[in-house]
Image (cartoon, helix red, strand yellow):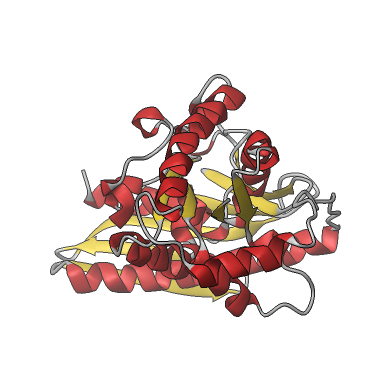
Amino acid sequence: MVRVFLSYAHADEALRHKFETHLAMLKREGEIEVWHDRELVVGDHLDNEISEYLETADLIVLLVSADFLASYYCYEREMTRSLERAEGGDVRLAPIILRACDWKATPFAKYVLAPTDAKPIVEHPDIDAALLQVVNELRRAIAKTADQRSGKGGVVDEKAEAFVEDRVSDPRSSNLRVRKEFSDADAARFLDEAFEFMFRFFENTVAELQRRNPGIEGIVKRANAERFSVELFQNGSRASSATVFVSRSYGSSPMIAYANGLTDQSNSMNGGFRVDHDDQIQFLKPWMFMFGRGGDDDAKLSNHGAAELLWEQVVAPLQR
């Protein structure tokens, strides 16, 4: 039995669950045992448990998205260690592109990715067909891995064998997801946290922009708890400016708004983000046909993803 470790961002939990559903036949055939962090139970030591499974896995699947790349734990801890083991020949690495992201700049870009041509799963007309294609590729990888572990291509790790025996002695489903409810208070807290994140993001990004680019200056100024502004100067001339604020002018729910230029008004904006949720997580959703992108109804942005979207607008005049 091949031990499979799934590394993914919690923002992609629904896709992870759907992917795991497609692994059902491989599980029934006794070909694989799948583990991910939702297997943890109360009282488990997070780092120790994850590290233990990561070190004894035969096949590590990276479920890649922008949220995966933005996650410190996924990228710096799980992915980095996975690459170290893969480079040493101790494990097979299988990167799967769930959603469009900057994966070409990553260290795992040199590996064969799935689906074919690394077309993101969500961009296929039929997600089930795309996942089936991935599973078929994994079958080939699992067969090679099993050959290596059986002695045809390597030595069986007795310690790892003992580990898996301990784990499968008390089998259970990994499908333990239940619907979560989010209150107005939860949304208010999420909005406050997102706004604070954006302010720190802009402070740090402008500071780094100046450090790397002589002739570029920037000012990020906090007006109050719900408003800040950013100005970028090139060779002393203002190149770009914007105001980010919490707006309560449109509808009953507050939102994070963006306006070109410097303003102390709250009734005019060029776009914004509303707090929304599905049955598992809260997220930020672009609003008002934001930035010419058509107000994608399916967008579920993390704090980092929304901040990056805003920063694209501010820095664009310096990149043309």
* Image position of 171 (left or right of 314): right
Residues 25 and 237: in front is 25
- Residue in view at x 84 percent, y 54 percent: 180
Question: What residue is shown at x 43% (from left), y 32% (from top)?
Answer: 115
Where is residue 167? Give x, y as percent.
69, 65
In the picture, measured across the screen, residue 159 lies left or right of residue 24, that is left
The count of marks equals 0
Quadrant of the rendered image containing residue 53: bottom right
Q: Quadrant of residue 156?
A: bottom left
Location of residue 78 with respect to 118 vertically, above or below: below
Q: Residue at the location (58% across, 52% down)?
A: 257
Q: Say if 111 sits above or below 42 in the image.
A: above
Q: Residue furthest front?
A: 151
- 22 left or right, relative to 199: right
Q: Is residue 316 visible?
A: no
Can residue 78 be seen at all in this image of the molecule?
Answer: yes
Image height check: is 234 above or below 152? below
Q: Quadrant of the C terminus?
A: top left
Q: Residue at x 80, y 53 (%)?
A: 176
Residue 262, given in percent of the width and then of the height, sits at: 44, 59
Query: Closer to the camera, 320 or 242?
Result: 320
Residue 46 placement, left or right of 109: right
Pick whichever, 40 or 72, lies toward us: 40
Q: Where is residue 247 drawn, in percent x and y?
A: 66, 55
